[in-house]
Amino acid sequence: MKAKTLRPWLTLPVALALATLACGVGGSSNPPTETPSPVQETAAPKPKPTVTKAAPKPTQAAQETRAAPAPLSLSDKPYDHPSGAFSITLPDGWDVEERDDGLFTSSPDNVASIDVSFVNVGVELTAEELETFINAVEANWFGSFQDYQEESREPQDDGSLGILKTLKLNDGTEQTVFSYYELRGTVVYEQDYWVNSDEFDAYESGLVDMANTMTIDETAGAEAPMYNSTYTFTGPENLFEMRVPYSWTYATDSSDTAIVDTFTSPDGLSQIENIAYDDGTEVSKSQAGAVALALLKEYYEVNDIKVTGDEVQADGSERLTWNSASKGWDGVSFFETRGTTFLLLTWIVDADSYDLYEPVWSATVESYTTPE
């Protein structure tokens, strides 16, 4: 009996409409590389922020359609990822593009594609935290596609979670996508299977067979940098861009004077937040430090902030390091003024988890740019 199937996921209406569906396994998307990817540009009205997706995923480029075998013919030899984190048997004749944390492969006719990847989360997530991770990936990646709709999710016999969804690519092609997410130690594995919806019946059996060939070495997977699967987030009014993890929950809030964008790790121990504050008046350099502290106290409801460092940066911004004994937090904040907009980028982390999450924060800061 196969470890993973699609048919049991279907709700009755879907089952009646797609009586022959069946499904596959799970893994997660990698930071952008030079591999083909569908460019999902969600342009929200100003001053709301926009999110641009750029991770390697099934290509949406127009290609000449060529005949492809269906059902699929799997290779006699498994593919072993160079990291040692996983092995899987791939279809014969499919082009493979390798990444540090996974692979992307597509059929010759560009009708079906597969993305396999893994994310080291650094700690063993609880069931609730894993669900938070999965929901964030679904929202931040798959939710960026037109007409994205989750059809069903079902726990599998091997401990993974299967999710079936439908969506449209940029060119309007309707796709049926099934994903499996599996936590092994401190590593979340994901496999995503993308198929043109009108061709799904021809491909599903071979994809299910392939999904069940995957083997995992979580010790090797845990050697990868934490949360290295990221996307580019563009702030309000194009004031900044930075890369943030796909699997961190994104939330935004706004008022007449501020837009707050927040990214929270699945375990809730680390949070990156940007406050764009603008009340129509320009904040002078002599006032900036006091404004930063006032915003920190107001937004984080903390009155015992102890500043342990204050450094002016080469780009003119200022860096505060601080902590709050009452909250058990360590914090780092960068602030600067752009016209009448005061920008405050802050990292808050549980004090006992500072060393664990510091590399993730550093990677975000290093990616921070001002769009031209």
Image (tube, grey):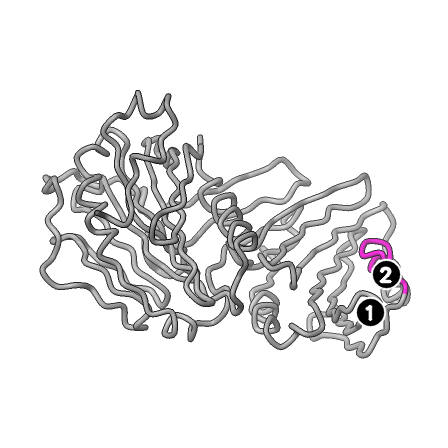
Magenta-span inclusion, residue 152: no
Asked if labels 2 and 1 touch by Cβ distance under 8 angstroms, the answer is yes
Q: Residue at x 9, y 60 (%)?
A: 76
Residue 298 belongs to magenta span: yes
| Residue 324, label in figure | 1
- Residues in magenta? 295-303
| Residue 302 badge | 2
Choose the circle earlier in sequence order: 1 or 2. 2
Residue 231 left/right relative to 170: right
Category of crowding for the residue at label 1, using alpha-carbon neighbours closer than 10 angstroms: few (below 14), some (14–19), many (at least 20) = some
Q: Which of the image's four quarters has the C terminus?
A: bottom right
Question: Which one is nearer the viewer's eye here, 121 or 306?
Answer: 121
List x then y, in percent, for residue 105: 25, 53
Near-viewer residue (282 or 176): 176
The CA distance from mark 1 to mark 2 is 7 Å
Q: Amino acid at mark 2?
A: Val
> Quarter-wise, where is residue 319 in the image?
bottom right
Q: Residue at x 37, y 21 (%)?
A: 13
- Please say if 236 is above or below 80: above
Q: How many marks?
A: 2
User: Element at badge 1?
Assistant: strand
Q: In this picture, is 174 found above or below 32?
A: above
Residue 132 percent coordinates (x, y):
55, 50
State whether the magenta stretch is mostly helix, strand or loop: helix
Amino acid type at circle 1 is Ser
* Residue 83 percent across, percent down from the top left: 32, 73
Q: Position of residue 340 (x, y in %)?
A: 81, 51
